[in-house]
Image: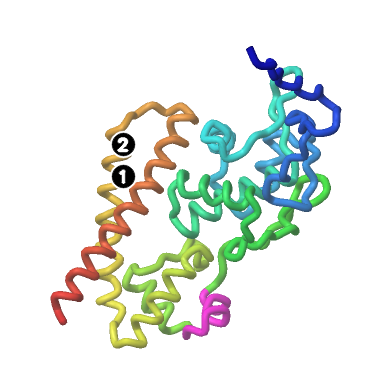
Amino acid sequence: MGPVHQRAPLASPGEPGRINESTAPQAEAWPRGISRRASMRISDVLAALKAEFPAVSHSKLRFLEEQGLVEPVRTASGYRQYSPADIERIRFVLVEQRDRYLPLKVIKDKLAELDAGAAAHDQPLIPHLVTRDGVSEASSRSMHLDAVAQRSGISVGALQELVDNAVITVDADGRINAWDEPVITACAALQQQGLDARQLRAIRAAANRQIDVIDQLVRAVGRTHSPAAQAKRSSMAVDLGEMCAKAYTAMLRQGIVELG
C-alpha cells in the first residue's frame, strides 16, 4: 500500500494563510462619510424629517424597518436608536417614493447597489438635513404663484390658468405645493406644443380616475386602522401607482405607433 497523504490541518484563526471571516473588514453601507453613532430616538428622526416629509410617522419608520430598508440599533431595553446615516437612508427612501413613485422593492435594490459602491448620481446627499444633534431646518415646501413662476420660468398668468382648470391646486393661503413642480414643468412643455389648459385638465381628470381605482383597491385589502396597516396600504398605493403609470405609458406608445 502506498503512503497515506494526510491533509494539513487548517490554520487556526489569526495564523498566516487563513482569513478570519469574523474579523474581515466589511464595506461601509451607504451613505458613507456620515456619522453612524446611533443616539437619536424615533421622535428625533421625525423632527429631522417632518419639515420635508409632513406625512412621515412612527408607523412609517417601523414599516421601513420591517422591509429591511433601515436597521436602527436596539438598546438593552428594546428601544430603537438611529444615527445621522440612518436618517439619510430613510430620506432616500422617502424621496424615491414621493418624487419618483418607485415601489419599495426597487428602492431596496437601489440601496443594495449603493451599499455595494455604486455612485449616487441621481440622489445627491443633502447634509444640511442632518445636523450634529439630529435636528434639521428644511425650507418650506410650498410657494406662492409668483415664486413658482420665477423658479420655473412660467408666467403667473399661465399658472393661474392651470389653477382655474384644476390641473394644480393652491392652499388657503394661495400657495402651491413644491411637489407640484414636476406637474407644472410637464404642463408647460405641453403648452409649448399647443395644448391649452382645458386639454391639460382632461389629462388631470384621467390621472384622478386612476387614483380612484388605486384607492378602491387599497381599501379593499383591509380596513384595519393600526399604524402598521396604514403604512402597508400606503406602500401598496405607491406600487400600484407605478404599475398603472407603466401600463398607461405602454398603451400610449402603442397607440402612437398605430397612428404612424
Q: Position of residue 120 (x, y in %)?
A: 62, 60
Q: Position of residue 94 (x, y in %)?
A: 55, 50
Q: Marks 1 and 2, how far apart in space?
A: 6 Å
In the rendered image, which residue does mark 2 sit on?
219
Q: In the image, 238: left or right of 204?
A: right
Say which amino acid is labelled 1.
Asp
Question: In what element is the residue under mark 1?
Answer: helix
Q: In the image, 259: left or right of 206?
A: left
Q: Is residue 38 magenta?
A: no
Question: In what element is the residue under mark 2?
Answer: helix
Say which amino acid is labelled 2.
Arg
Q: Report whether residue 205 is seen.
A: no
Q: Position of residue 130 (x, y in %)?
A: 74, 51
**Quarter of the image with the N terminus in it:** top right
Name above or below for residue 132 compared with residue 68. below
Q: Position of residue 98 (x, y in %)?
A: 49, 55
Q: Which residues are magenta?
A: 145-155
